[in-house]
Image: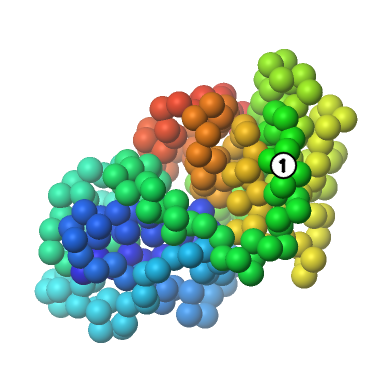
């Protein structure tokens, strides 16, 4: 059996699920997910996330407490000590590509971020099926999805700020792409596709309106206020994937918005630096994506 621990927001959940799903398929094993982190009381200052991955057609059942205990700590206290040393001393959080994970056999408990397509390239077709939106969430976005499909030269622009910009604890690890990065990316597309249409996705729409200059062809998908009338993260992700081209922030949500676009002719501009240096991520971007220089600061 393979069990993957889900943690973080939707983008991270998709990476974790895809890595575990692919490993289980390769091992001809059962695959389950550990969602216990979403059932506890949050620590002070911690950003709690929802299990938005359930908006998709995922099939993995939830692992029981006993199954998690058996796979996570097969040797009891010895396993607990070894995991603690691995995380706190060796700082192994499995963020980038670790090919040794694909060599594992037998029962496997995965706890990491696995932010590279190399973990799941062997199972792409099936994973894309799993990451299709359930009909109840797809229906409300059908109309705008069709309008994006009918648009020539559509470009998604995802701008992640939120805790990156406002939470000192988070900003110590993650860069905030500055306005110059996004503006240069906008000009990049305007030079090549003068009539392109920009579709803006952001957790800080007011900042976008006050700091970036567009052509007349700009549509804000995200709203200024997150309320009951806003799109769900999963819906925004699918709408992002319907655009022909993409401008990314250093966000796993951004990453999947571009990755779920199956077009081989898409142009993807992505930050050339993904974090503040707490871990190297040379394998996060597919080779066909353009590493676009990032600035530091807000």
Residue toward you, 78 or 60: 60
Residue displayed at 51% across by 53% down: 11
Quarter of image, res 182: top right
Q: Residue furthest top?
A: 191
Q: Quadrant of the N terminus?
A: bottom left
217 sits left or right of 113 in the view? right
Quarter of image, res 28: bottom left
The vertical placement of 12 against 256, above or below, is: below
Q: How is the image coloured?
A: rainbow
- What x and y, as percent, mark residue 101? 22, 51
265 sits left or right of 123 in the view? right
- What x and y, as percent, mark residue 55? 56, 66
Residue toward you, 167 or 32: 32
Residue toward you, 1 or 251: 1
Q: Residues within 10 Å of mark 1 (few under 14, many from 20)?
A: many
Q: Is residue 91 visible?
A: no
Residue displayed at 33% across by 54% down: 19
- What x and y, as percent, mark residue 6? 41, 65
14 sits left or right of 108 in the view? right
Residue displayed at 36% across by 75% down: 61
Q: At numbered mark 1, what does the secondary structure look like: helix, strand or loop?
A: helix
Residue toward you, 229 or 80: 229
- What x and y, as percent, mark residue 277? 44, 38
For the image, the number of numbered tags is 1
Residue displayed at 20% across by 49% down: 102
Q: Is residue 38 visible?
A: yes
Q: Quadrant of the C terminus?
A: top right
Q: Which residue is mark 1?
A: 148
């Amino acid at each position: 059996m393979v069990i993957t621990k889900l943690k973080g927001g939707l983008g991270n959940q998709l990476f974790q699920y895809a890595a575990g799903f692919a490993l289980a398929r390769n091992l001809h094993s059962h695959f389950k997910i550990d969602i216990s982190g979403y059932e506890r009381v949050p620590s002070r200052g911690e950003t709690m996330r929802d299990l938005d991955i359930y908006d998709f057609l995922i099939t993995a059942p939830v692992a029981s407490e006993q199954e998690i205990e058996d796979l996570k700590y097969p040797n009891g206290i010895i396993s607990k000590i070894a995991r603690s040393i691995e995380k706190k001393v060796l700082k192994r959080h499995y963020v980038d590509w670790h090919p040794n994970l694909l060599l594992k056999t037998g029962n496997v408990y995965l706890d990491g971020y696995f932010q590279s397509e190399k973990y799941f390239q062997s199972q792409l077709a099936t994973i894309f099926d799993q990451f299709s939106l359930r009909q109840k969430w797809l229906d409300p976005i059908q109309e705008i999805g069709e309008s994006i499909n009918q648009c020539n030269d559509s470009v998604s622009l995802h701008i992640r700020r939120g805790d990156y910009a406002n939470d000192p604890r988070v900003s110590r690890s993650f860069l905030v792409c500055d306005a110059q990065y996004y503006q240069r990316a906008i000009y990049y597309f305007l030079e090549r596709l003068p009539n392109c249409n920009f579709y803006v996705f952001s957790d800080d729409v007011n900042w976008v309106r006050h700091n970036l200059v567009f052509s007349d062809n700009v549509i804000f998908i995200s709203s200024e206020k997150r309320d009951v009338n806003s799109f769900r993260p999963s819906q925004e992700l699918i709408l992002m994937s319907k655009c022909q081209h993409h401008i990314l922030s250093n966000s796993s949500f951004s990453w999947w918005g571009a990755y779920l676009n199956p077009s081989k002719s898409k142009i993807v501009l992505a930050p050339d630096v993904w974090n503040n240096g707490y871990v190297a991520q040379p394998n996060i971007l597919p080779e066909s994506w353009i590493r676009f220089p990032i600035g530091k600061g807000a």
